[in-house]
Amino acid sequence: MKTDRILSIIRIAALVLICLTCLVPFYVLLVLALNSPSRIFYEGNIFVPDFFFSNFIEAWHESRIGQAMVNSAIITSGTLALAIVLGGLAGYAIARRKTRFNKFVFGLLLSCMMIPGIINTVPLYTLMRHLHAVNTLYGMILVCSTLALPSAVFIYSTFISSLPMELDEAAVLDGCTGCSVFWRIIFPVMKPATASFVILNGFGIWNNYSQSVFFLQSRSKQNIPQALSVFFQQFGGADWNMMAATATIAIIPVVAVFLVFQKQFINGLASGAVKG
Amino acid sequence: MKRTITLALAVLMLLPVAFAQGVPEGFGDGGKDVELSFFTGKVETIDVIDGIMDDFNALGNGITIEQEYQNDASNIIKIKFASGEVPDIMTTYEQEYVDQRQYLDLSDMNQWWDRLVPSMKDSCTDVNSGKQFRVCTNMTMAGFFYNKEIFDSLGLVPATNWTDFVKNLEAIKEAYPEIDPWFIFGSEAWSLGHLIEFIPHGYLKAKYGALETKKAMLANDKEVLGFGEPDGAMAAFARGLLEVQQKGLINSDVLTATSDNCIEAFVKGEAAMFSNGMWCLSSILAKDPSMADKIGFAPYPSMMEDGVPVVLVAEDSGYSISASSANQQQAIEFLDYLFSPDNQKRYSEALGSPSAFTDVDAAWAPQSVVDGVNEAVASAANIGYTNEKPAGFTGDDAGRMVQDLLAGRYTAEEFAKAYESAWDAGF
Amino acid sequence: MDVKHKDFVQFLSVPALCLYLVFFVYPLIQGVGMSFTDWDGMGRAAFVGFDNYAAFFSDDRAMNDIRTTIIFAIASATLLNLVGLAYALLMDRRFPLRGLVRVIIYLPAIISPLIMGYIWYFLLQPQRGFLYHALMQLGLPDFVGNWVLSYPKSLAVLVAVNVWQFAGMTMIIYLAGLQSISCDLIDAARIDGAGSTQIFFHIKLPLLVPAIRINVVTNIIGSLSVFDIIMSLTQGGPGYSTESLSIYIMRMCYGNKTGYSTAVAMMLFLIILIPVLVSLRLTQSKD
């Protein structure tokens, strides 16, 4: 009983420490966001900011972060939806029908996941231009889904492989056809896989910069990192207070979505329990 | 069920094709306006350009223009050129595209050249062809910013040669041990690259003239450049830097300090001088407007026996039109509008650098600073910025070599040799 | 089983393949073609055969970058998995505010790594950073010192920041795996007299294989193509000492060696491929 209590104290202490480490940089971000532009960062008490709230108002206008958040949200949800549908279907086929074709598809996707995307830049830009997809959100969604697809296929096929085959067979005996097995039986139990995929890729898409610099050009189409980039000066340094304020604004909806999504996620985990 | 899924699959596969046929951007509201694209990497001018564009678009002369700003403009423009989609107007400029005639020849645009300061027209002139492919609207200067209060309290004047320069630094160090006499923010490689560009390259430009030096650089003429010589300008520069580092006359965190640190140290009076361009003025004044009376500006002292003090006076805000643009006439029309004296006054004041047009009278900085800068420019040899460097050896690469020098990986002579071989390899 | 349905299901991977062929493979083939040319990104390209690949092996900067990349990746992928698993084990039980703690641990992963790197530089900058000043204000000595000047210390800082940022992601995948292990199984083992250690190694670990597979592969790929963190913390410097291969590729691509950069990118692909294949083989499901 005594060792149990000591263990749980250690556990709590560890968790508190972990949480603090995770929060420190956000505290710095917040301090920066709340300091007046004339404040010299390391002067005075570094733990207490100036509470200069007008940074947020100015940052909101100057960065057009509102529009950028809407764009990032459209791109992220569109990309995730497309990648989940295509990746889920492909992952199922790959996990359950180990034909030479499916092995090829899996191998191709997985190897391309390891190829530095920079190689593609010029040909991809040319292609997008011919498709009139440069500077459009759907174009960005297509490019981002393509990049996220290998990860989706990999995660879905790994998860489905770990599901017992009896699940499909029982469904078939119940009269389900091949595809309805997928929709009725497999898709619902794939929630943990979907959650994992969203967790691993969602915020990368939200924060995408390497593709958005090419495919989103006008300020009305820009995403969050591009909105932040206006605070970087050409020769060194940045407008840190403005940038921190903008970044703080941009974090809020993400944290909100994550808090809401978490419930779904836990439900997903519970239904994944068939595995054991 | 099966049929639905087949249908769904067909739709999915046709998705990209369907999008390809989609409505092109920006049309649909029946407008017949010519749409101009404007590409820039100049973050300081986003807002003022947006304002001028709004006014221009409101004129209703059948042209609308939109600005695209990219932080990595010089990289992104390469992808655009390579893919054949070039903006109508751009602020980026590459020697190789000049050689390929990718920019519209602006040599006949006398309505602009007649108004421009002659030396700025020279800076805009392509050395190989003698023609102009860009117009620059502003000038920028670089030299040593120094704290007048500190200098006055010790009775110091800015030095014109290296020996006096070191003496000044030593005097400051002795009187105020807690102040860094010369602050170098070496974590940002570009700033060290600028030191090379202004001091050893500056020596060559002052000695042989801008045009000769540019030609020598394009031809890699070792007689003129002499980068590897143990008694040349490059070795002297390295020797000087190592000397001030050894004597503790520069900040001890030279390799990790950032330009933000530099500005804060200067504003707090913890740094007596630093090298930078006019673009840092607005950051200093944002931190402390009262610095306007304390900012002094001085040329770079010569590190060579036969050298003279130099100050950079370079073109800023260059505009080019794409040679393949279908809307060249409209692009010229917009630039005419942008270059009007009123708009240029607005532009210069937003950018914080003096106009290159003779008929624009802009209050680009507090008067005390403007006077100091003018005096420094008049007192020293004016050097331009050279773009005629090997493409494979950028100013950033040069700055990284200086980092290695300051990290103790080279002697001065080794540095000069290494610089020369990196230069040759970049060719 | 009905053969017809079976045939149909096996082609469910076709739409994904189509999208991929159009937007990745087609541009890729053109891109790889560039690795056999001397294209400078601006002018005309000439075919140079395998010269770029040959040049790679005598390129000192590339060799140094490979070393940095591999050391970073080994340390970072290992630590990410160990730390992520440890976090997940800590979290795998009910306690108050568990949801909040989970969000907090995951928080670092939601902000752009580029900004995070700058924030960390604010914190860790030698002689000036937040940490240095905090230590000074608390009257403690600066135990971090000038890490930028020491190669091992800079790598350690880079790895630590990377682990800090992505441990939450790894944790969640492990947590998903742990929570899908049925309690009955563990209760049964406990009744049979198994201790916590035994339960972990004999029951939990084998059942975590899918999660391990996903985490290991994702982290290997992510760590070997590290870019943002290094770019914003050290810019690969001083000099080129902490440059990663991805940064080198980017710099060459936009420098005047676009053709060569493509060849280096293909080499990086091979460097990533080998450990990924090994870990896939090791975590293959039994059939």
Image: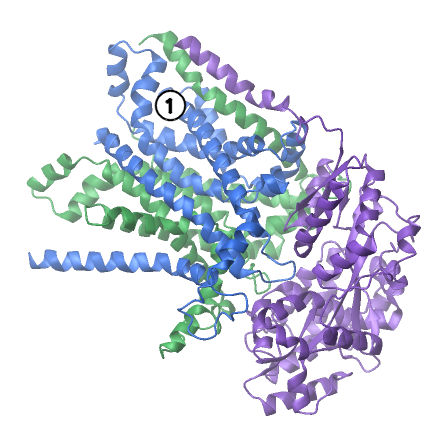
Label 1 Cα crowd, 10 Å radius (few <14 / some 14-19 / many 20+): many
Residue identifier under label 1: A92
The blue-tinted chain is A
* Residue at (63, 76) in percent of width and height: B291
Q: Is residue B375 above or below residue A179?
A: below
Looking at this view, is A112 or A151 the one in front? A151
Chain C: colour as depicted: green
Residue C130 picture location, percent across and down: 44, 69
Looking at this view, is C128 or B23 the one in front? B23
Q: How is the image coloured?
A: by chain
Looking at this view, is C216 or B131 the one in front? B131
| SS label for mark 1 | helix
Residue B111 picture location, percent across and down: 91, 51
Chain B: colour as depicted: purple
Residue B244 picture location, percent across and down: 64, 82
Q: Is residue B14 above or below residue B368?
A: above
* Residue at (18, 35) in percent of width and height: C182
Query: Is residue C68 something that shows in the picture?
Result: no
Looking at numbered disc 1 in the image, what kind of residue is underneath it? Tyr
Q: Is residue B401 left or right of residue B64?
A: left
Looking at this view, is B26 or C202 the one in front? B26
Quadrant containing the C terminus of chain A in the rendered view: top left
